Image: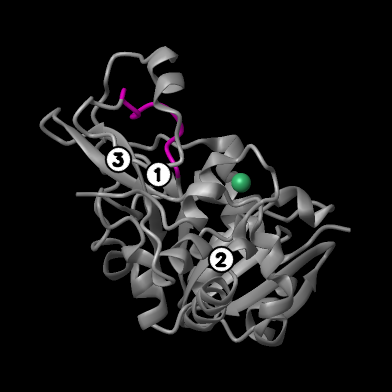
Amino acid sequence: MSINRAELQSAISDLDLAGRPVCIHSSMKSFGDQVEGGAQAILDCFLENGCTVMVFSATGGKYKIKPPLNMRPARNGVDYDEMDRQEYGKPEIYSLDCNDISKEGMGLIPYTLLQMPARRRGRNPLHPFAAVGPLAEELIEGQSAQDVWAPFRKLCELDGRVLLMGVNLDRATILHYAEQVAGREPFARWANDPQGNPILCRMGGCSRGFNHFADCVKSIENDRLVGKSLWRCFAAAKLVEQCANAMRENPQISHCGNSDCIRCDDAVAGGPILE
Ligand SMILES: [Zn+2]
């Protein structure tokens, strides 16, 4: 049995997503059965319902550069000695029209969205967001190397939704924005600016502990099965509020539990110390 447009349409209606901006995190494998028309058909169905679809579209390693000696904040979730031992390729310069994406890490829906000529992409060389639909520009335009989570701030303002298609909360990048709302600094990494000068570029850390928020978001969660894929839908603003409150009460809640995880240790302590 394959999943057809009527089924996608009824899920979008049941979850009250029409006309809204929706940040989607997805696993095509979660559907089990074939989705007729694949990732593109899913995107088209949302767009036909007046939605704006936003995705996280991390670029993988291509634009990372070696941390300059004068740009190495403490408590930054990295071991600088280890970073110095790594090999770095020729530094590349990110541009908004590039389609570089970590395909395995991000999945087929973000990959497919990036190929669409109307898509907008954010100005963060390492962790850009991308979007298509009527509010794409509005959602994306605020993103910069420094302000990595601007698209989530806008998503909350516009009463948008976060939709997990067959993935868990450990894929909900917005919980890194919730960390910032709770008072943590986003981590600093390094990339080139458009002129080829090194800059700090903010991003999230370890997400493996985010499933610990399952209980505290249960009351605001709307679920719907689509084939074998469980769609979990949240109002973005409420999700951020609940999780930020939970972190204020118990900062350890976001920790993945691995005693060697320097990213979680440093995030729980408040993130990098920037001058
Ligand atoms: Zn961790």
Identify which residue is drawn at 32% across, 68% down: 139
Label 1 CB sits under 8 Å from any ligand 1 atom: no
Q: Position of residue 223 (x, y in %)?
A: 74, 78
Q: Main secondary structure of the magenta part?
A: loop
Q: Residues within 10 Å of mark 3 (few under 14, many from 20)?
A: some
Q: Position of residue 127 (x, y in %)?
A: 39, 46
Q: In this image, 229 relative to 261: left or right? A: right
Q: CA distance from mark 2 to mark 1?
A: 16 Å
Circle 3/circle 1 CB separation < 8 Å: yes
Does residue 226 show up magenta in the picture?
no
Identify which residue is drawn at 70% across, 58% down: 167
Identify which residue is drawn at 57% across, 77% down: 249
Q: Amino acid at mark 2?
A: Pro
Q: Position of residue 230 (x, y in %)?
A: 77, 67
Can residue 210 be seen in the rendering of this structure? yes
Which residues are drawn in magenta?
58-66
Marked residue nearer the N-terminal end (2 or 1): 1
Can residue 205 be seen in the rendering of this structure? no
Label 2 residue SS: helix
Which residue in the protein does label 2 denote? 251
Marked residue nearer the N-terminal end (3 or 2): 3
Q: Amino acid at mark 1?
A: Arg
Label 1 residue SS: loop
Please tell me the numbered disc located at residue 75: 1
Q: Position of residue 240 (x, y in %)?
A: 50, 75
Which residue in the protein does label 3 denote? 73
Quadrant in the rendering for residue 150 = bottom left
Does residue 63 show up magenta in the picture?
yes
Pick the front one: 256 or 88: 256
